[in-house]
Image: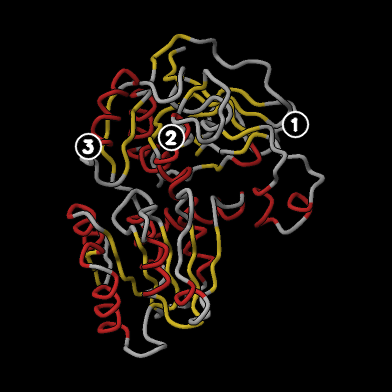
Amino acid sequence: MQAVRVVEYNKPYVLSTVPVPSDLEPHDLLVKVAVASYCHTDGMVAAGIYGTTLPCTASHEGAGTVVAVGPDVMDFRPGDRVMCGLPIGHCGECAECKGPESQQHYCARTAGLVGLLTDGCFADYVRVDARWTTLLPDMVSFLSAAPLACAGRTVWRGVRVAGVEPGGWLAIVGSGGGLGHLGVQFAKAKGLRVIGIDARDEALTLSREYGADAVFDAREGQAEVVRKVQEVVGAGPNGGADATITLSDADGAAALACAVTKMHGTMVQIAQPDTVKIPFHELINRDIRIHGSVLCSAQESRDMVKFVAEHGISPKTKVFDGLDKIHELVEEVHRGKVQGKAAIIVDQGQLGQEKHRKTQ
């Protein structure tokens, strides 16, 4: 099969011919990939930040059709349309595995993470763990599902743990990016009022397009953004969003997120800069709670897909046809020319079958 591989750190991807995955573990699925998408984290993998053993097939965001199942798989069968899971295996013995279902994906002794530590979805086939993979309803297309596999799962959990009640205010720093525009949609569909904050013209436009109630430009500076947020939400010590999600890894993003959050509010940190920088007076003097979050659990993923189907939520995608377009995709991403998510159609035939199914 063909696969887009990281062969050397900080070097271009290489389109290679490699064996189709075989010898499935008991809980594994072999998925024929229909669509795979590019995530900010893919750049971190290529830079060596995760210490990935090379060569490794890229992309941890994929959707496709099950073609084979491991002997212990009970909930999937060949022909099922799925959104690929990220973790491969979990120990079943640690506190996370035995704790609440919503924490089990934090197991530190997984066998790997698809596209980060094991071969990923920029390939004709990928091996994934059935326990973290999500069945797709007919209303959710492969093209929508692939970006949801990481971006969607991650910001879905971020909105949930922010804990804002319907009618409350949620701010999103990085609201016009791949995760942000999905977060805006999730929050609005849950009945929240949304403040979008970003620092690119295209991202500000996307924030408005997907329904943010107020949109502010971070380039105007923290003091001005705080002033404008309080004009909308209310001034004074308790003025500000009930909670804020930080999706930007810009140097001042976490500090800005805390500053626009009301006293005693919550800031959910999802972005992964080398260091999260927050001045003490924003964190301590205002009693801001910081909640780190990543991905979501298997049940949360099922809930997300159901919610997406019910509310017609869809990622904005720039589509590239074929794995051989990987260098064109990366160039456009790095030039900042992609709104939302960049996705590759790996198997056009599956999209045709999907379209035929919907018309029947």
- Packing grade of label 2 (10 A; few <14, some 14-19, many >=20) is some
- Please state, as top left, top right, bottom left or bottom right, where the C terminus lies in the image: top left
The tag on residue 335 is 3
Label 3 vs 1, first from the N-terminus: 1
x and y percentages locating residue 306 in the rendered image: 49, 54
In the image: residue 107, left or right of residue 210: right
User: The disc labelled 1 sits on which kind of residue?
Assistant: Asp
Residue 297's x, y, as percent? 61, 51
Query: In the rendered view, would you say 199 is above or below 122?
Result: below
Cα–Cα gap, marks 2 and 3: 16 Å
Element marked by disc 3: loop
Q: Secondary structure at mark 1?
A: loop
Question: Relative to 167, does residue 132 appear above or below in the rendering?
Answer: above
Image-based side of 52 in relation to 204, left or right: right
Q: Which mark is residue 42?
A: 2
Q: CA distance from mark 3 to mark 1?
A: 45 Å
